[in-house]
Image (cartoon, rainbow, N blue to C red):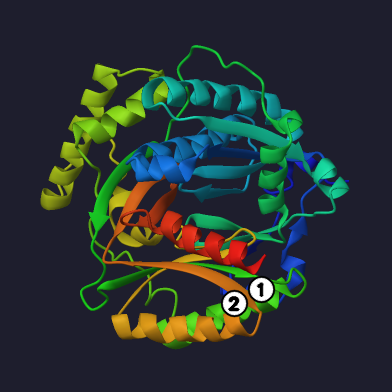
Amino acid sequence: MINTENFYKQIPVIKTQLEEALTEESYFKSVPNDWHIVVTDIENSTDEFNNGKYKEMNIISASSIIIALNVADKYGIEIPFIYGGDGASMVIPGKILDEVLEALTTLRNNAKYNFKLSLRVGSISIENLKKYGHRLKVAKIKIVEDYTQAIFLGVGLAQAEKIIKSDKRFLSRKEGEERKLNLSGLQCRWNEIEPPSHKKNILVLIVQPLKQKGQTITYKKILEDIEEVYGSFKRRHPVGEKEIGHSSDFKTLSKASKIKYGRLNILYTGFQMVKSFLSKVYIKSNIKLPIQIHEDYIHGDIATATDTLKIDGALKTIIAGTKKQKEELLKKLQRREKSGEILFGHFGTESTTITCYVHKREKEYINFIDGTDGGYIKAAQELKAKIKARK
């Protein structure tokens, strides 16, 4: 009998292209009944975004994930997760549920005190989710060396969020302790990343299949449309293999300090500023530095270890190309929308931002990426309007 604590750790890594993986549903494994979906999201996020709190929402969302990862890592457990600009979803075993929720409620306190943002924290077991008629399947796919990503099938994550929002029984009532949070591995920057010189147009896209049955076929068709217009995953990637270095801006780094300590910690913020400065020196001079700055992260394939393509009940992706390519793809999507296959939301911009990067464990990194000016939030607004109009 499989130890469910190691469920995700034991899932084989898919080493083929996502389009091919979607045709083989045996890659996707049902999450065990004694695992839980933990959801965090900023209440009234659209209003908060319009009030200019986009960066604060991003760091809180990323912090949710790193908190869960660090608790899981303590027990040698691997967990899947999905980052959203105004929240996050983590799927974890029951063994670490209480510890994760306690830390997240401390995060909730820090967010309220420092940024006047209300963070909703809740969870639902897979067993309870099934009572509502929903299941959750997950696969683990290799994106680049040392970076794997969870792919979710079904509407389980989206339905879990809806249930938690509508039923207070699933919200965490813990108060959270006044203590330092373990956010080891979290770095936030918001530096704008220019796309490759010949791909000056960035498209942020969210595509939602209208029928749950045959979802994988719909995803495959959309990915084929994207590849036909833009080319391979590597060709359309919005981040080139160049510097995406750390921000040394005091306001940016002080946000991380307030989340981590519940207040501004001058020593921590100052150290991060020095570290960021030295990382830039390293890039320019390639000299040996007295502190580790994750050299393997700054160069090479780690630059492409970003969540530019994810599936969590909808397909979400960020693509770099030309204006002509964007218009061609949008026409294809509009035809699929008219035929009743999908609904989609999109947003066009000229650059991306690396919101945060997470050092999951030794030589394992992930960059959370978005289009500048709140790409995913604006694409989601268009999609939500279409869903509302359809109803």
Look at the image and tell me in which quarter the C terminus lies.
bottom right
Q: Residue at x 32, y 86 (%)?
A: 324
Residue 19 is labelled as 2
Judge by depth and name the residue closer to the eye, 29 or 257: 257
Label 1 vs label 2: CA separation? Answer: 5 Å
Q: Quadrant of residue 356?
A: top left
- Return the residue found at the far top: 178
Q: Is residue 213 above or below residue 119?
A: below
| Residue 174 in view | yes
Q: Residues within 10 Å of mark 2 (few under 14, many from 20)?
A: some
Percent x, y of residue 318:
42, 66
Are the residues flagged by discs 1 and 2 in contact, CB closer than 8 Å?
A: yes
> Residue 262: horizontal and vertical position, in percent?
40, 18
Q: Position of residue 281 (x, y in %)?
A: 13, 44
For numbered disc 1, what is the local secondary structure? Answer: loop
Above or below residue 103? Residue 220 is: below
User: Relative to 60, is 173 on the left or the right?
Assistant: right
In the foreground, 70 or 46: 46
Depth check: 230 or 121 in front?
121
- Provide the residue designation for mark 1: 22
Give left or right: position of 246 versus 169. left
Q: Which three-letter amino acid code belongs to the residue tagged 2? A: Glu
Q: Residue furthest left?
A: 285
Q: Is residue 357 above or below residue 309?
A: above
Looking at the rendered structure, the kind of residue marked 1 is Leu
* 127 horizontally vs 216: left or right: right
Residue 290 in view of the camera? no
Which residue corresponds to the image point at 64% horizontal and 85% vertical from the top-left?
Answer: 339
Q: Residue at x 59, y 77 (%)?
A: 19
Could you classify mark 1 by the number of other residues whose Cα lies within 10 Å: few (under 14), some (14-19), or many (20 or more)? many
